[in-house]
Amino acid sequence: MRKVITKIALAAGLLLAPALAAADETRVIMVSHGQAADAFHGIVKNGFFQAGKDLGISVDYRAPESFDMVAMGQLIDAAVNQRPDGIVVTLPDPDALGPSVRRAVESGIPVIAVNSGQDAYKALGALAFVGQDEALAARTAGERLKEAGGKKAICINVEPGNVTIDIRCNSFTEGFGGPVSVLQTSMDPADIEAKVRAALQADPEVDTVLSTAAMVAGEPALKALKATGQLGKVFLGSFDLSPAMLEAVRDGNALFCIDQQQYMYGYLPVAILQLYKHSKILPANDVLTGPRFVTREMAAEVIDLSAKGIR
């Protein structure tokens, strides 16, 4: 996938060669809610830095130490003060981050939203959105788990207050059609494992679990299922990928992982901002990178790519 994206971006760059040769170096800053230890956002960073390398663009990635919208807004404000050629932002809470994003736009800095805020980015003045249709992904997950035989479910919300995770659990409930309890947790895997185990023991009728993050919640859920003797008996699906979750899908202990291909969250905005700077070229619609459902038939193919920080 990285090779394909790179070829597309480089082809675009060749078309702009005369303009690029005479231009000053392009600088792009990304401000994300993804903390340093977050494996999901580590893949976003990999794509972001690879795009900078491939396209000869100066890139800088910034994130708060925890899920903190005040701190994230301050990081966006600091980026605006540096006057880069573009800012890439996640929008887990558009209301909280809106003033900072608008400040960037009003300062004449192009902004692209990624990962979250699909319904809000236009109102804030951002130029484009690169990400997954979260509602579609979650509804489809609910439908698939229902078709597999699920009757009663829990949805693990690893980041209460993150609108993207809320959408996942709400839309999953819509697609599943049966009773769904939202299990609110921290980002601590031990906390998640303990709460999933307690939920399964408290209600033996629960036969379905949706994880909203593979490494953070999916892997602890696997441990909880194993500890309670229900591994392979409870229907399990997860957003995002991790080697352990993909192995569970491969081995029949989980039905699917939902791949939003977040490597492109980092890579594509850099190319888009370069094109916009030199030619005012923009996508006509949202750039949707998912959902792609990784099932048992294809899980083995992407395990190595997941371990390498690409998928």
Image: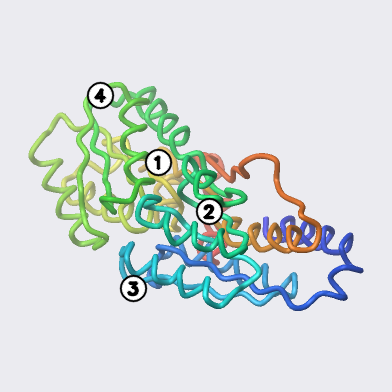
Q: Are marks 1 and 4 in contact (CB under 8 Å)?
A: no
Residue 295 in the image: above or below residue 84: above
Query: Tag 3: residue type?
Result: Glu
Q: Earlier in the sequence, mark 1 or mark 3?
A: 3
Q: Which residue is mark 2?
A: 114
Nearest to the eye among marks 4 and 3: give it: 3
Q: Which residue is mark 4?
A: 151
Query: Tag 1: residue type?
Result: Gly
Residue 232 in the image: above or below residue 264: above
Query: Tag 2: residue type?
Result: Val
Q: CA distance from mark 3 to mark 2?
A: 19 Å
Q: Residue at x 51, y 47 (%)?
A: 121
Q: CA distance from mark 1 to mark 4?
A: 19 Å
Residue 65 disc label = 3
Q: Earlier in the sequence, mark 4 or mark 3?
A: 3
Q: Residue at x 44, y 57 (%)?
A: 242
Q: What is the quadrant of residue 107 in the picture?
A: bottom right
Q: How is the image coloured?
A: rainbow
Q: CA distance from mark 1 to mark 3?
A: 36 Å
Label count reads 4
Q: Are marks 2 and 1 in contact (CB under 8 Å)?
A: no
Spot occupied by residue 17 in the image (x, y as percentages of width and height): 89, 67
Query: With 276 as the anchor, is 181 left or right in this view?
Result: left
Nearest to the eye among marks 2 and 1: give it: 2
